[in-house]
Structure formats: structure tokens, C-alpha cells
Amino acid sequence: VDQVRELIERVNYSPIRGRYKIYIIDEVHMMSQGAFNALLKTLEEPPEHVIFILATTEPNKVLPTILSRCQRYDFGKIDPKDMKAKLKEILGKEGASYDEEAIDSIIDLSDGGMRDALSILDQVLAFGGNSLRQQDVLSVFGLASTKEKVAFLNSICQADVVNTIAKLNSFLSSGIDIKRLIGSLLDILKDVLIYGRTKRIDLCTVLKKEDAEDLCSRISAKKANQMIDLLLQTQINAKSVSNVRSLFELTALQMCSFFSESQDEPAPQKPAPSKTAQALEPAQKPIPAPVAEAPKPVVKKEEPKKDYDPDSGDIYQGDQPPSFLFEDSSLASEKPVPTPKKAEPTAAPQKPVEEPKKEDASKEITPPSSAKSLSGEGQAISLDDDTVVQIMVLGAKFKAERHALLTRWGEFETMKLDPKCGDAAALLAQARPFCLCQDALLINFNFTRLKERSNLKENQKVLGKLVEKVLGRKVFLFGLDRQDSNRIQSKYFGLSQIGKLPRPEDIELKLPR
């Protein structure tokens, strides 16, 4: 800001010799906002004898109020031929010897900027004396020669991992920049694609004709594209990793695998028998021997781990939440498949055997006769998160009953075709018991619209009667969706970790009626 103020004071003085005083501000985008504001008024109403030239490589960083008061000129990159002619002219005036390859390397590094090219030329001449050599340019800026990079690609094409790693270590020990090396390899592969399609060396920017023909004979267009994609991905990953060397070594090994001939061969298959051999085989079928019925596997029940006892009166202080929250809900979908018995031949007609009575006829579910189809809209019931957490705390005592309910939940599938309660049974069949306590049952749906339909007041009576038939007692029913259950579980776990879960004996549920 102080320098801008000094500039404004000098602007008021008229030029002594010329007609105009010209001020060139380079890299103007580096000015602070305060400096821009101090200069703004002078740019709005400059004296007649003053011309400001603002130079920048990033005009997007200049304030719009400054840009709107300037005449803008966008300069493009200088043609490489013009840059080469200018560099030769300067080297001739300096009386320095040079290599053509060294000038080409400087032009590549400058990326079309003449000022950058002159700066690079000064650095290389200061390093190598009064001569410009390719090796000096490569040493100063950590580059590899085209010959070395072509040899590196040839070792990759031969899938020679030892030679590839050796050349890579040689590059790195010479101080070569890996990011620039990746960029130069991309240029070479681009030339391979161009020459492979056109056979015109004048369109290539890096390779000579001999190198282009050699690489095209080794690298197909498909493999070249694979290598380009891998190198581009490596360029992106190099910005976020700490060890770029290991990343590039892995890239080189993966490129070697593109050319590796060792592939997993399929297992040899047995030759199919000829028709003659099949005809010679006797057409006798083996008589199956009677197979004894396999004994049923004995399932050993694991001793349940000691869980939180809600009657102990203590605050839950475990590292993990009660196990009833993580029980597998797939038990409800597993239905026992009856194994049909094989019919045994009888020697003589026997008396018909009476069908044995069912052991527990009370478990048969009779749909309620007063059930009606579910409503799609109406007043909905709601529970706050604290009440749901209280139900989860009380549910630790009813873990076994919830497990039994989970195994019988599939019975709603058999009730879906009943005209009186099929709609309600179909809705319940798409849910799973989430938590059960003495007075309430939480069920979990995968979709929000199903949860909303189950929580309508008009549907609670029908759904409650079906659940009462399966559970054996009347409970308050409330539906949750995935977002609700995830949110409640996170809250439950948080309270559990800090020991702030409510005590079961202190909980008094207030459920809607």
C-alpha cells in the first residue's frame, strides 16, 4: 500500500523529456486488496500524461473493478520456431556454443514463455560456462534424456522388472524429478500413438523416426492407451501421497505386467469319451443300495454371555451396547422346509393310519374377523427420540421374547392372501422387530412410506391385532425407517459411552393412546 501511495504522488508530475510517463506493474495479481483500492481512483481518472500497463499471468485474480477500467490484451504462447530463432540470436551475440537438443529442452521447459526461456538460458550458461549442452540442462533441472526414457520404456515392454527398477533407481539417484518424468513419458507415448496411426514423424514432438518405429513395434495402441491412463492416474495420486517414489515404482511394475506373458493357464480338462467308447460301455445301471437316514446334526448352544441386567439398578457402563440391538434379523425369513418322507412299499394292505394331532394347536393363527384394509392417509402417531431410547433400555429384559418373535415373524407371509387382513399382513411382512419391551414394540422398515403408513392412527388397531396374535399379548406398535434407526442407535451409543442412559426402574413410558 505504501508503494502504491508513492506511485500516486509521482503520477502528478509531468514527464521531462517524453510525452507520456509509462508505469508497468508486473504480476499485478499479487497486489493486496488494499493496494488495489488505493490505486483504483487513479485508474479511474488518470492524468493525461500517464499510461499504466498491468501485466499478469492470472487475470482471474485481479479485482473486477480494476479489470473493468482497463483495456485488455490477451497474449498467447510464442511459437517454438520463433523462440528457437531468438535463443540462437542471443547465443550468437554472447559468443556461446550450443547444442540443438539443449535449445529444444529449454523451449519445452519454458512452455511458450520467452521470459522463462531466457531465465533458463541464463541459469544453464552460469552452470556450464560459455557453452550450452544438453547434459547441463538435464542436470540443472533434474531431467532425463529422451534416449534414457526410450530405454526405460523398452525395458518395460520386455517385462524386465530387474532392468526397469535399476533404470528407475538411476533416474532417482541423479535427482530427476518424478513428476516431470511422468509428463515426459506421456509425451513419448502420445508420439507413439500419433506415429502408429499416421507414420508422419513431423507430427511427433519428442521422438525421432528410429525411436518411434522401435516403440511402435513393441507397444500396440491398446497397451499405449492403458499406460497413458495409468500414468495420468499416477499424476493425480502423486498430489496426495507422501512417498512419490514408491508410487512410481508401483506404476512401473504395473506397466510391466501389461507385457508379461505369464498368465494363469486354465486347468486341463479331461477329454470327452469317444462315441466308440460310449458304445462299448455296458448299459447297466447300478442298483442303488438302501441308504440309512442320516442322523440329525446336534447343534450345541453356546452359553450366552453375561448381558446387562436391567433389574440390577446400575447404570449401563459397558463398552458395547446390549446384544439385542445386533441380533441377526434374517432369522425371521428362514422358514423350516419340511423334508418329504420316502414312500415304503407295503406287502399287504393295512388299515389307514390316523393322522396324529398337532402338539400345539394354540399356535395356529386365526386372522381377526374384524380386520379391515389399511388406510393410506390420516392422523399419524409420533414418538420423540428420548422415548425410543427408553424403550431400547427396557428391551434388554425382553431379549429372549424378541428372539422368539423374530423366528415367528414369517407367519405374516402366510396371511397375505387372506381377504380380511392381507393388506395389514403384507405391510408387517416387510418389517422386522427392532426392539421389544413390556408395553411397546418397535419395528423397522426399509422405506419411509411404509413406516408412515404403519404409524397412522386408523391402521394401529388392525396391525396391533395381528401382532397380538403372533406375540400373544397386546403391545403398542411404532414403525421406524433406516434413518430413524441409525439416528436412534447413534444417540443410544453416545449416552452409553458417557454413562448417561436412564435406569430401567426410573423409566415411566408415556405412549400415545
Image (cartoon, helix red, strand yellow):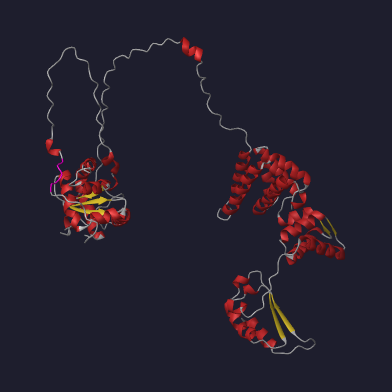
Measuring from the top left, give residue 266's x and y in whole percent: 54, 28
Q: Describe residue 257's horizontal placement relative to residue 513 as left or right.
A: right
**Number of labelled discs?**
0
* Residue 24, placed above or below residue 320: below
Main structural element of the magenta stretch: helix, strand or loop? loop
Q: Quadrant of residue 155?
A: top right
Q: Describe residue 80's horizontal placement relative to residue 501 as left or right.
A: right
Range of magenta residues = 365-369
Q: Describe residue 370's horizontal placement relative to residue 16 as left or right.
A: left
Q: Quadrant of the C terminus?
A: bottom left
In the image, 478 versus 104, the foreground residue is 478
Q: Quadrant of residue 452?
A: bottom left
In the image, 144 versus 109, the foreground residue is 109
* Residue 269, placed above or below residue 375: above
Measuring from the top left, give residue 328's x and y in whole percent: 29, 43
Measuring from the top left, give residue 382's x and y in whole percent: 23, 60
In the image, 404 versus 225, the foreground residue is 225
